[in-house]
Image: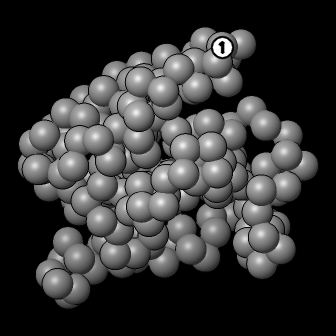
Amino acid sequence: MIEAIKKRVEEKLHDHQKRLTHVFGVYETAVKLAKIHNVDIEKVSIAALFHDFAKYDSIEDQVAHMDLKTIKNYAEYPVIYHAMAAAIQLEHEFHVRDQEILNGIRYHVWGRPSMSDLEKIVFISDSCEPNRNFSDSEMIYEMASKNLNQATEYCMKISIDHVIAKGLVPSPEQMESYQYYKEVNRGEIK
């Protein structure tokens, strides 16, 4: 299945070489972290490869795959639509029903409280894959190699700071997720 998914992603993103390079960087980084943390490599691979599958679809095409409740829930934050749409497309095209894989795709943009290790790995890898033009990438990878929760919190903080720097307001879900991992890392949540 991995090879079929790789081929499909390459077909879909062939006009977006930079994005394709990013996707394969996320995939390679996620596989390395999965090996370190003893997480199912096939499941991580599927989620990492498909996470940005709908990135260049129009908003209309993205929401065409989603239910009305999800569309309304994220209406002020359409940046999340591509993640939700990609999970649905994976389910339809490849008959993937594994919720951990689908959640790894759905929540790769800003995470969520109580993520599985697979979800954290995809979320973190999206920030620290080596093709990102980001000075902290290597440090994030090293942190993630040792502690996924700390790396998750750090990536969430960077994402929130980026949103604020653009003059936007982080979503309530984004803030809730960040607060959750701060509390986890302080030992307030087990």
Is residue 99 shown left or right of residue 125?
right
Q: Relative to the observer, which residue lies in front, 115 or 152? A: 115
Q: Is residue 157 visible?
A: no
- Say which quadrant the C terminus sits in: bottom left
> In x, y percent, where is residue 23?
48, 28
Residue at 58% across / 38% down in the picture? 52
Q: Relative to the observer, which residue lies in front, 105 or 138? A: 105
When the figure is inspected, residue 95 is found, relative to residue 18, above or below; the finding is below
> In x, y percent, where is residue 12?
67, 24
When the figure is inspected, residue 19 is found, relative to residue 165, above or below; the finding is above
Residue at 42% across / 61% down in the picture? 98
Where disc 1 sits, the SS reads loop
> In x, y percent, where is residue 174?
54, 68
Is residue 17 shown left or right of residue 185?
right
Residue at 83% across / 74% down in the picture? 68
What residue would you read off at disc 1? 14
> In x, y percent, where is residue 34?
19, 44
Residue at 21% across / 56% down in the picture? 148
Is residue 89 shown left or right of residue 4?
right
Q: Is residue 2 visible?
A: yes
When the figure is inspected, residue 16 is found, relative to residue 162, above or below; the finding is above
Residue type indicated by callout 1 = His
- Say which quadrant the N terminus sits in: top left
When the figure is inspected, residue 126 is found, relative to residue 182, above or below; the finding is above
Q: Badge 1: how crowded within 10 Å, few (<14), some, or many (20+)?
A: few
